[in-house]
């Protein structure tokens, strides 16, 4: 039967292998066309993402660090997340300017994790069961547990990847992120100790940090009371403590305790242990009586 009389079947040659009989209808054509279009869109999105990374690498980076020296910062957070549920976390941030940064994150009712980043690569480690998960840049959009914070927030704290200001049209209060997959820009109201920080990013998400106070920790100024405001969530952050890592390594509790010398009892302290011995007078008299 010719194909014009029965368009539901068609013959498709495949080189020298042979001829295969493939169902052929309008739905199949639409599916094939849609698959090709989606494949091209996926390739284009990948090309744009790679091009964006190349542009970021081509521009000069001007890192913005909150900490310039090796320190340990303990942070506490309380939030109302997107699901309108109360949640909290505790973070111990160990910052090393020339080494890995580690964030030990603990939750009251969630599995704790450790986020480690070196700028070029990063991973998350879970304790029970112990699993280490390698992360790419696209994973930075993920939330930290059930809180509204993102892994990208930890990455920006650790590495401060921001682009340099435009020399033609400088805006000193606007900072553009370099490799962030969640936040595109950060705007501060003043420097060097801003009171309001606004961040804008993917899916038109906007959030504002209202800094209530700054405090000196071992010569470093850090925000101590921070209020997080967004359309979908809110919360508060506190910096409980911060101290240099060098001081922690010299903690007297970690040093080897020096042995205490044995104290001689007062009764025997005046008895000579070397040299000429002096015999008391009563003993001399006793010796003379014994001789007689």
Image (cartoon, helix red, strand yellow):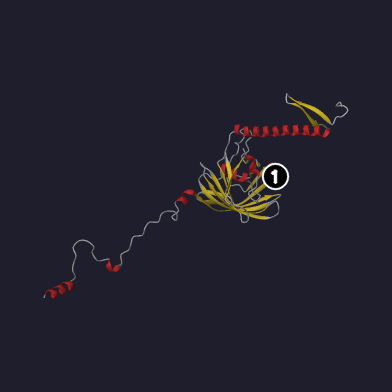
Question: Where does the image place residue 24, in percent across and percent down from the top left?
Answer: 82, 31
Image coordinates of residue 184 in percent, x first then y, are 66, 40
Quarter of the rendering containing residue 269: bottom left
Is residue 180 visible from the viewing direction of this image? no
Quadrant assignment for the N terminus: top right
Examine the rendered structure and indicate whether residue 74 appears above or below residue 39.
below
Instruction: Count the marks.
Output: 1
Q: Residue at x 69, y 42 (%)?
A: 202
Instruction: Determine crowd level at label 1: few under 14, some 14-19, many 20+ residues with C-alpha closer than 10 A.
Output: few
Q: Is residue 71 left or right of residue 190?
A: left
- Against 240, is 51 above or below? above
Looking at the figure, which quarter contains the C terminus?
bottom left
Residue on which the image places disc 1: 205
Instruction: Please tell me whether mark 1 sits on a helix, a strand or a loop.
Output: loop
Residue at the image point whose x is 16% and y is 74% from the top: 286
Q: Position of residue 194 (x, y in %)?
A: 61, 47
């Amino acid at each position: 039967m010719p194909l014009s009389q029965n368009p539901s079947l068609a013959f498709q040659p495949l080189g020298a292998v042979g001829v295969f009989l493939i169902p052929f209808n309008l739905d199949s054509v639409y599916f094939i066309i849609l698959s090709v279009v989606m494949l091209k869109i996926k390739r284009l999105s990948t090309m744009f993402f790679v091009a964006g990374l190349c542009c970021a690498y081509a521009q000069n980076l001007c890192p913005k660090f909150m900490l310039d020296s090796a320190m340990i910062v303990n942070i506490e957070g309380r939030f109302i997340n997107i699901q309108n549920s109360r949640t909290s976390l505790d973070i111990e941030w160990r910052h090393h300017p020339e080494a890995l940064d580690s964030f030990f994150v603990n939750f009251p009712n969630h599995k704790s994790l450790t986020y480690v980043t070196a700028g070029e690569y990063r991973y998350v480690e879970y304790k029970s069961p112990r699993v280490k998960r390698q992360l790419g840049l696209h994973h930075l959009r993920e939330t930290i547990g059930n809180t509204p914070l993102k892994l990208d927030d930890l990455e920006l704290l650790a590495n401060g990847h921001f682009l340099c200001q435009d020399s033609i049209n400088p805006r000193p209060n606007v900072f553009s992120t370099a490799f962030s997959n969640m936040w595109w820009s950060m705007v501060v109201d003043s420097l060097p100790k801003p009171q309001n920080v606004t961040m804008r990013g993917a899916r038109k998400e906007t959030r504002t940090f209202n800094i209530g106070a700054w405090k000196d920790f071992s010569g470093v100024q850090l925000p101590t009371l921070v209020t997080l405001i967004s359309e979908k969530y809110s919360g508060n952050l506190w910096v409980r403590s911060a101290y240099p890592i060098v001081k922690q390594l010299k903690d007297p509790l970690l040093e080897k305790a020096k042995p205490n010398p044995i104290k001689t009892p007062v009764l025997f302290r005046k008895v000579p242990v070397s040299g000429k011995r002096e015999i008391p007078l009563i003993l001399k008299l006793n010796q003379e009586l014994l001789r007689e």
